[in-house]
Amino acid sequence: MTVLSPSQQTLLGQLRQICGQAHVLTHEDPASDLSAWEQDWRKRVKGLALAVVRPASTAQVAEVVMACAASGTPIVPQGGNTGLVVGGVPDGSGQQIVLSLGRMNAVRAIDPANLTITVEAGCVLQNLQAAAQSAGFLFPLSLGAEGSCTIGGNLGTNAGGTQVVRYGNTRDLCLGLEVVTAQGDIWHGLSGLRKDNTGYDLRNLMIGSEGTLGIITAATMKLYPQPAAQLTAWAAVPSMQAAVELLGLAHQHLGPGLTGFEVMGQFALGLVDKHHPQLRVPLWQGSPWCVLLENSDSESEQHARSQFETLLERALEAGCVSDAVVAENLSQAQALWHVRESITMAQAAEGLNIKHDISIPVSRIPAFVAETDALLAREVPGVRMVNFGHLGDGNLHYNVQAPVGMPGQAFLHDYEKQINRLVFDQVAQFDGSISAEHGVGELKVGQLPLYKDATALAMMRAIKTALDPHNLLNPGRVLGAN
Ligand code: FAD
Ligand code: MLT
Ligand code: ZN
């Protein structure tokens, strides 16, 4: 058990007064198990929290921040703890509190005429989607972790997911924010306005700041009409170049109906087949790549199906598709999406791995993959590529698994630096980004000075210092030691 200083004891007393005894969890209580908040999803880092604090309202968040600021205690905001870059867990010092937004999960309002929904930060994404659906609308943000990630975390990371090709990332879906600042002030920015040019864009600054600039307590998000029909197809393609050609045809034939375009490499699908044997993975054995396409149609299912058929005929003629299936009904479509969304779990089951969440201009992806695969195979013989992702957005999860027989821990220890360097140098050569949608967190902090424009980094540091001069909010994340 950690020995607490008198000022930490005083702080814990204050936090209990603010949030209630039951909502301040510490290691002092032997019955409390804090590992769900201290361990990151990928099991890369296990931190040690001074306390996990679970406020129930924005006013409580503000009071918690003021108490922590007065005692100089750092705060790590946390939603569903599904982040993939170690951004939402405490460090190992035992000095930081985790501010868990999970109890703040209410849907505050739906404005059908304005096409907006206002929710609290701890609202689980799936519940937000369901609330939109019950009101007759679509909230399009969708990702594999949607059953546990929260809208606060989605905004914190500016999450992407599988519908970005049509609706954009979380930033594009947000109209207003309520934020508690590092001083404990509340910014009431929950406007549902689509136009507001009254100065700097603080909303977009907060989104993607990974808890380093403010604590998001609520958000006003955009709603969309539900499509009349949604169809899913699965196509085997002979090469990455063919997948890019298929994307071009899909844009041409489906227009704004194209709401999903995911690419999956053969080895990635093989891992799903191996670790989730109950799932039926179609067409993967005979093809290096498969593509999952979604067509959301505002007319009818018949219209969507005939559009899809025309697209796939053209693609077969052009040789960019070798075989394809179109889901006959919703449950078949869900089964196809389930296979796609299971890759992350299957890869985790295979062992610790190196993830690269990169973006490259779509036109250059085939050359990037061919060159980088060859360089990696030369550098680490036997290395296995778990390559998949949101090709429609130019976003690849260009992940690297240890050679057969090499334990994951040893692989990371011996090769992570070298492999990151190789891949990120290639990304830079191809005018890409080293983080497309997962963020920087702690895992990529060391990379930012190598790959981000120095002037941009200096401006980011100036903003951090201005908004959080005592470096209390998620210190060490994104920018490293400030
Ligand atoms: P957390 O993990 O709790 O936190 C993430 C970051 O946001 C941390 O830096 C944290 O400090 C900060 N934060 C959390 N809440 C707040 C708040 N209220 N105010 C300010 N900062 C806050 N990501 C994608 O982009 N696309 C995908 O397709 C995708 N698929 C995934 C699939 C799986 C199986 C898993 C496990 C993860 C996936 N992710 C994906 C990553 C992850 O789900 C997203 O990053 C998600 O947005 C994190 O939400 P969370 O609530 O779990 O946030
Ligand atoms: C996904 O798209 O499934 C996640 O963002 C990717 C990952 O696990 O790298
Ligand atoms: Zn992704």
Image (cartoon, rainbow, N blue to C red):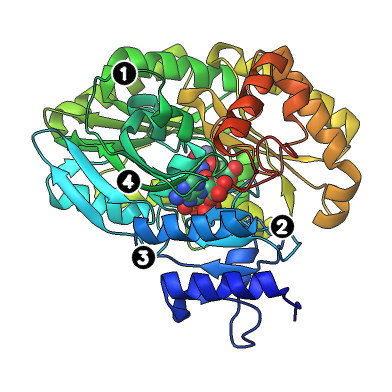
What whole-number distance in Å separates the C-alpha atoms at marks 3 and 4? 38 Å
The span from disc 2 to disc 4 (Cα, nearest Å) is: 41 Å
**Can you tell which of label 1 and label 4 is closer to the viewer?**
1
Image position, residue 135 (x, y; %): 12, 48
Q: Amino acid at mark 4?
A: Ala
- Residue sitting at 69 percent across and 34 percent down? 479
Dot 2 amino acid type: Asp
Numbered mark located on residue 333 in the image:
4
Residue type pointed to by label 1: Thr
Measured as percent of width and height from the top left, residue 454 is found at 72, 16
Binning the other alpha carbons within 10 Å of mark 1 as few (below 14), some (14 to 19) or many (20 upward) gives few
- Label 2 – label 3 distance at C-alpha: 24 Å
| Residue name at image x 43 percent, y 40 percent | 155
- In the image, 364 versus 404, the foreground residue is 364
**Dot 3 beta carbon under 8 Å from ligand 1:** no
x, y percentage for residue 238? 56, 24
Classify residue 206 as left or right of residue 42. Answer: left
| Residue topped by disc 1 | 198
| Residue at the image position 51 percent from the left and 71 percent from the top | 14
Of the pair 462 and 185, the residue shown nearer to us: 185
Where is mark 2, residue-wise? 91
Q: Which comes sooner in the sequence, label 1 or label 2?
A: 2
Residue 245 is left or right of residue 448, and the answer is left
Type of residue at label 3? Ala
Q: Which residue corresponds to mark 3?
A: 56
